[in-house]
Amino acid sequence: GMFGLIFGLLIYICFGEKLGEDPMATIAILQEDPYMSAWIVGLPFLFLVTGIFNIKATEVTSSMTRNVWKNLRTLLVWIAALCIFYMSGNSDIGEAWLMPGSFYTLIGFLTMSGGIVVYYWHKKNEIEATDAMPLQRTDHEVV
């Protein structure tokens, strides 16, 4: 986080004008518009909170689950884009259902969801089998 901020600011200050962005004009805009300043501070804070929740989710479940949740977030965005396209009546926004590409996307998400079910079903069975095993004492234990 901090490394990215410092590194990004250095690149922006050094090369911003060469890339068509005036750093001083950006600072002036941020001083004039408090909402833009709040957005600049609030968005990284939102990413920080999301990252903390991702770490906690990985602690409770597994890294595989966290990565699947990231893909499910993509599914929600895709569904929202489809809804926006058909509900708005404006073909410039959202995403249309395309043949056969949208079916490929849907099949991919269904395959991923099926993988989640199989993974956790297998994991649950392993845990139950381990819990059902009686504890055995070895010859090396002191009684």
Image: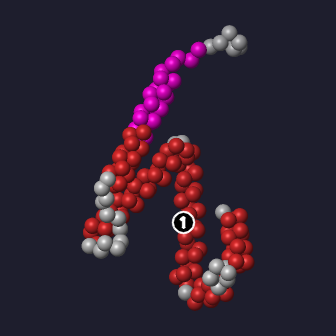
* Residue 84 located within the stretch drawn in magenta: no
Dividing the image into 4 quarters, which one contains the N terminus?
A: bottom right
Give the residue drawn at x 40%, y 61%.
77
Give the residue drawn at x 63%, y 88%.
25
Visual colour scheme:
secondary structure
Q: Is residue 47 above or below residue 9?
A: above
Could you classify mark 1 by the number of other residues whose Cα lies within 10 Å: few (under 14), some (14-19), or many (20 or more)?
A: few
Q: Amino acid at mark 1?
A: Leu
Q: Position of residue 107 (x, y in %)?
A: 35, 46
Dividing the image into 4 quarters, which one contains the C terminus?
A: top right
Give the residue drawn at x 59%, y 74%.
41
* Residue 123 located within the stretch drawn in magenta: yes
The kind of secondary structure element at disc 1 is helix
Q: Is residue 119 above or below residue 44?
A: above
Q: Is residue 113 visible?
A: no
Which residues, given as a range, are shown in magenta? 116-136
Position of residue 84 in the picture relative to residue 59 (left or right): left
In this orientation, which residue lies closer to the viewer: 125 or 9? 9
- Going by the picture, which residue comes out furthest to the front? 100
In this orientation, which residue lies closer to the viewer: 96 or 57? 96
Residue bearing mark 1: 46
Q: Position of residue 125 (x, y in %)?
A: 44, 28
- Going by the picture, which residue comes out furthest to the top? 139
Residue 121 figure quarter: top left
Main secondary structure along the magenta-highlighted residues = helix
Q: Position of residue 59 (x, y in %)?
A: 57, 45
